[in-house]
Amino acid sequence: MSTVPTTALDGEATGWTIIDSIGNLDGGTSDFAYAAINFSTDTNGTSTTGTIIDTSVENGIVGFTPDYLARIGNSTGSTLGDWLAADVNGTGPIDFAVDPLESIPNRVSNALDHIGAVNPVFSACSSRRHCH
């Protein structure tokens, strides 16, 4: 990969076939991502090949840098409807769960207990009171 951000991968990466991609930017102005969809704490950072999703705008509560990124169910696209970006609660590994106040889609509250299985179709909390 390039040591200087460019519009394309170079070196060994020029022969790669990209099957899937997701990026996670922590909000630094020098951040650079090559994925088809990239989540960012704010609109800082650059992606010349994909979309940057500002977590503070999409979440409507607070911007956050996701700890966990996952496909939603058996989705195959690169849109907001295909990916979950969330912070994680718990001390793990058996009690990790999506933080419903820092997730996109909003207010998702699922246990992360599906290792080795198909990703769940994450569901929203029934009310803010049940999201804690």
Image (spheres, rainbow, N blue to C red):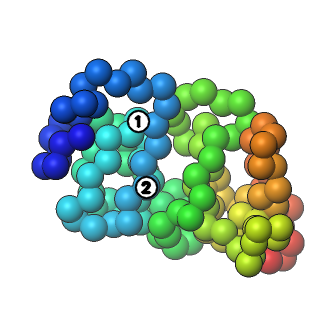
Write down the quadrant of residue 13 in the picture: top left
Circle 2 is placed at which residue position?
24
Is residue 22 visible to the viewer in this orientation of the structure? yes
Q: How many numbered marks are there?
A: 2
Query: Image check: 115 left or right of 102?
Result: right
Give coordinates of residue 55: x percent, y percent.
48, 61
Above or below: residue 40 compared with residue 28: above
Taking depth in this image into account, of 3 and 125 the one nearest to the observer is 3
Quadrant of the image occupied by residue 18: top left
In this orientation, does residue 110 appear? no
Counting from the top left corner in percent of width and height, residue 74 is at 71, 30
Question: SS class of the residue under badge 1?
Answer: loop
Split into 4 quadrants, where in the image is the N terminus?
Answer: top left
Three-letter amino acid code at the position of disc 1: Ala
Q: Is residue 32 left or right of residue 68?
A: left
Q: Which residue is mark 1?
A: 36
Task: Categorize mark 1 by other alpha carbons within 10 Å: few (<14), some (14-19), many (20+).
Answer: some
Q: Earlier in the sequence, mark 2 or mark 1?
A: 2
| Residue shown at 71% from the left, 74% from the top | 89
Q: In what quadrant of the picture does the C terminus appear?
A: bottom right
Alpha-carbon distance for marks 2 and 1?
A: 11 Å
Query: Which residue is depicted at the point 38% across and 59% down?
Result: 25
Taking 70 as reference, is 130 above or below it? below
81, 119: nearer the viewer:
119
Report crowding for label 2: few under 14, some 14 to 19, many 20 or more residues within 10 A (C-alpha). Answer: many
Q: Residue at x 24, y 25 (%)?
A: 14
